[in-house]
Image (cartoon, helix red, strand yellow):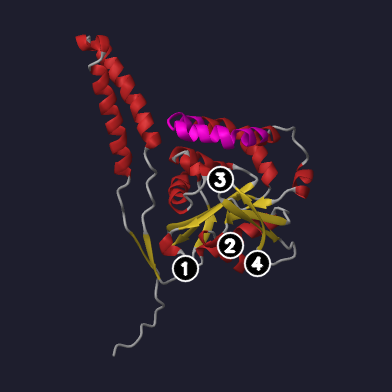
Amino acid sequence: MPSPSPFPRQPRIRAVPDGPWLTGFAVTAAFAALASYGLHHIGPLEEHLSVAVLLALIATSLVAMSIGAALAPPPLPAPVVVLGGRPPVISDLAAEQARFCAALHASALPHGFFVSLGPRFLRRYYRSFTDSPHAVALMACVDGHPVGFLVGPVRARAHRRWVVRNRGLGLAFSAVAALSVRPGLAAQFARTRFARYRKALGRGADAEVPASDVQAGDVAVLSHVAVLPGARHTGAGTTLVTSFERAARDAGTRIAYLTTIEGRDGAGPFYERLGWSCGPIHPTPEGRRMQEWTRTLDPEAKA
C-alpha cells in the first residue's frame, strides 16, 4: 500500500474549450452571402456595372455582418472542472475581462432583460462597473483561471449619476442597435420599461449633490454575481459576496440590497446562510417574482 504523499494536494483546473464562436461566424457569413446574392440579382445591378456592384456588395456585407453579430448568441465560457485545492483568489475585475462576464451572465443569469440585448451591450454594461468610482467589480480565480465574478455599486445613486453622465450614450447606442434588429423585444421594451428607464435617466441627470449627502442616504446594491458550475463548491461565491460587503462597509454604506428569483430557482438560501434578511416580493415587467434581500453592514465588523 503506497504511503500518502507528504505534499498537500494541489488544485487542478481543466478548461474544456468549446466552439460557440463558430455560431456567430456562421450567422454573419449567412447574412452577408444572402444579402449580397439578393442585391446582385435585383434591379439595375443585373447589368453588372462593376463599380456599382462592388460598392453595393461591400456596403451590404458590412450591414449584414453587423446584423449577424448582433443576432448571434454570445459564446459560453469554457466549462471548468475543479479538482480539490486552494481557495479562490479575489481581485479587481479588469475592463478586458468584460467578455468573460458577459458570457457567464448569459449562461448563468439568462432571465434578465439585459441578456436579450446581446453580448455587445453586456460587455459595455460590465465595463461601466469596472470604470465607475462608486462601484466594485470583482473576479474570482483558482490557479489563475477565472471562475466567477461580482459587480455592484457601493453607492447606488452616485453610481447611477456617474453612469448616466459618462457611459449613458454608449449604453443607449448599444441598446438601440440591439432593439433595432429585434422588433418583438423593442415592442416589449416600449410597453414595459421605457417610462421607467426615462424616469431613472432623469434622476441620474439631476444636479450634483455633496458626496456626504449622497453617502448618508445611499445603499449598496449587489447587482450580479455568478460562478461557473464546476467551481460552485470552492467558496468562490461566498468570498465574492463577503468581499463586496467589506467594500461597501469601507465606503461608508450601512445597508446592502439585492434581488433574486423567488423560490427554488433563486439563490435565497445561499444569501440566508450569509446573514442576509429576506424582504418583500415584487414582480418584474415580465411577471417574474423577485425577492428582496438586505444586509445591515456593521461599521465595527472586522474585515
| Residue ID for mark 2 | 268
Mark 2 nearby-residue class (10 Å; few <14, some 14–19, many ≥20): many
Q: CA distance from mark 3 to mark 2?
A: 26 Å
Q: Secondary structure at mark 4?
A: loop
Is any atom of residue 175 visible in this view?
no
From the viewer's perspective, is 55 left or right of 220? left
Residue under pointer 4: 275
Marks 3/4: CA distance?
27 Å
Q: Nearer the viewer, mark 3 or mark 4?
A: 4
Mark 4–mark 1 distance (CA, rounded to whole Å):
19 Å
Q: Quarter-wise, where is residue 1 in the image?
A: bottom left
Q: Amino acid at mark 2?
A: Gly
Tell me where residue 35 appears, x and y as whole percent.
29, 24
Placement of 92 over or under 11, stated as above or below: above
Image quarter in which the C terminus is found: bottom right
Q: Is residue 272 magenta?
A: no
**Label 3 or label 4, whichever comes before in sequence order:** 3
Mark 3–mark 1 Cα distance, whole angstroms, equals: 26 Å
Going from N to C along the chain, the mark reached first, 3 or 1, is 3
| Residue 233, label in figure | 1
Front residue of 3 and 180: 180
What separation in Å lies between label 1 and label 2 (alpha carbons)? 17 Å
Identify which amino acid the numbered label 4 is placed on.
Answer: Gly
Residue 102 picture location, percent across and down: 46, 46
Give the labeled residue for mark 3: 130
Viewer-side label of 3, 2: 2
Q: Residue at x 51, y 59 (%)?
A: 265
